[in-house]
Every structure is written in C-alpha cells, then in structure tokens.
Amino acid sequence: MKSLDKKLKHIKGGKYKPSEFIIADAKDGDMAFGVTSPGPAGKGRWKSREDYLDAMQQMSDSGLVDIMLMSASSAEILKQRGTFSKSPVTPAVRMNDTTDIWNARGSCYRQYPSEPFATADLQAVTPLCKLGLYSMTFSNDLQADKASLQAYGEFRLACRETGFRHFLEIFNPAFDIGVADAELGHYINDMIIKALAGVTHADYPLFLKIQFNGRDAMQELTHYDPSRLVAGILGGAAGTTRDTFELALQAEQSGARVALFGRKINRSESPVKLVELIRRTIEKDVSPAEAVQQFHAHLKQEGIKPQRSLKDDLKITEPILKL
C-alpha cells in the first residue's frame, strides 16, 4: 500500500497524527507556464525539461513526499524509467487545464472566467497511473460556473467507468468577482460544499486542494464533514522560506491534512531539504523560524548560494499568514 492510502485511511478514520500529514510535489507546471516551468537557470535562462524530470526523480527517491503530480507526458517518461514501481510515492496526473491556468508570458487568459478544457486523455493516462487532479475555479458567473460543474460531472462519470481516482482543486479567482475579500473564503467554501453535496461516495474526490484563505475559512471547511472531506492547501507563489513553513503549519493547525506545493518546492535552493523541514515543522520538532535557520545552515554547509539573506528569508511576506 502506498503511503497516501495508509495516511488517508487514518485521517478519515479520525486517527490522524502530524506524522501522517500528506505532502505532494506539484510538478505539473508545464501545463500552465510552459518553458519557464522548470525554474530559472540564471539571468534570462530557464532549466530544461530533463532538469524538471530529474527533480521529480530526486524528490520521489527521497521518500519525503506522498504524491508526485505531473503532466501526462512527464508521467509517461517516469513510468518508463520505473520511478514509482517500488516507491511509496503515488504518481498523479493533472487531468484538466482550464483556461485560467494558461499562464504563457504576455497572455491575458486569467482576466476572464475559467472555461473547461482538458489536454490529457483519461484512456491514455490510466495505464500510467490511477490518480488524477481535476481543477475548477468559481467566478460568481452563472454560465461559467454552470459549465465548470457540468464538465466536472462528465469527468466523474468517465472516472467511474475506468476506476480512476481523483482529487479536486478549487482555485481562487484571479480577478474581482464582486465578492468582498473578507467573504471570499466563505464563498469558496460554500461552492465546494454545493459542488459535492450531490456526489455519492463512489465518485467523491479523495481530498481537496484549495488556497489558504485564512484560519477561519479553513477551520469552517474542515469542521463541516471531517470523515469525508479532507482539505489540502496549494502553495501559490514561491514567497520566502518562512512563508512556506508558516503556510504548512498554520493550515495544518486549522485542519488541513494535505499540502501540494509547486513553486515553493521547485524554486527552492534545496527542495529535498525544504520538504524535510516542512515535515519537521508540522510535527513540531522545529518552529518555522528555526526551520528557516536550519535551512540556511544546510545551504552554507553544501556551498549553495541562498536567494535571500537569512534576515530577509525569516520574514513573513504573504498577507494571509500575518492575520
């Protein structure tokens, strides 16, 4: 049994311990950012596809994550290499790439309500893995949100016919949708429950991936139906190293049981060490500030130049984490 399934069984059975917090490395950025997804390789240059695949292999080999989320093309290559054949890590594929994640340089797609779209084909992905991510963004727009829910229903039906499992990602909208900032987290919560209330157990997502909209919103959602609805957080922008540890800890303390970090891991100077310290922070071995200090000590020991000074990297820069 993969570590994901063992942990989910305990979480849904009310036996959760911080050591069972689920971490996913989200390396599906090529479906959103294109060439820039592997990360910078110096001024004006970007790492290659092979660098991206090597990072997936290294993180999977570490055993520190429970899920490796990829594009279908990356999953195909790593399956051919045997990356997950004897690994506790569960491979997963992003199954849809709605228009609001189209982040090509110079593009303006995120200025408009999300429209359903999927490049990946379920029949082609199923031989590669049995778990996928499906995402939606609610825009407080009747036609757009109705289309998103209808497309999600069609996806669930296709999954039922193949035995494919999924987890559900709900993004915050990227533009003003007429909902006050203080109410946005509650709007998202209500739409999640509305979207899943008519879904029976066989078709239910394994867990959620959502933006952290503060302690109150997360506690409200995780209190609603803890035996059925497992909430996880997405990482968003890279931020400081302190932001990463604070986000993981504050979310876990608010009831989240999963973290799916993309740029926060991929843009780190030492991704494997970062994930190790995320786990130690959640398990209360170190505080977020102590974790930052230990991270910088590791960089110095390994001769890796830090992106920021220790003083700057100890700062909390994401506003929601300061509340």
Image: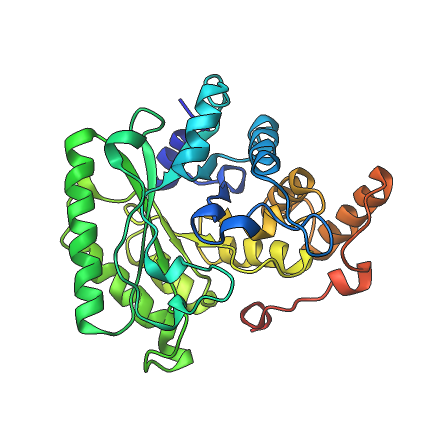
Quarter of the N terminus within the rendering: top left
Q: Residue at x 19, y 41 (%)?
A: 203
In the rendered image, residue 171, in percent from the top left (x then y), is placed at 38, 61
| Image position, residue 22 (x, y; %) | 48, 40
Q: Residue 283 placed where, x, y %?
A: 60, 44
Classify the position of the C terminus by image quarter: bottom right
Residue 218 can be seen in this image: yes
Side of 217 where 282 appears, left or right: right
| Rendering coords of residue 280 (x, y %) | 64, 43
Give the residue at x 44% y 40%.
16
Q: How is the image coloured?
A: rainbow
Answer left or right for 34 relative to 295: left
Among the 4 quarters of the image, the one containing residue 221: bottom left
The residue closer to the viewer here, 197 or 223, is 197
Nearer to the camera, 131 or 243: 131
In this image, 228 relative to 5: left or right? left
- Point 48% across, 34% down: residue: 66
Q: Is residue 202 visible?
A: no
Q: Is residue 159 above or below residue 253?
A: above
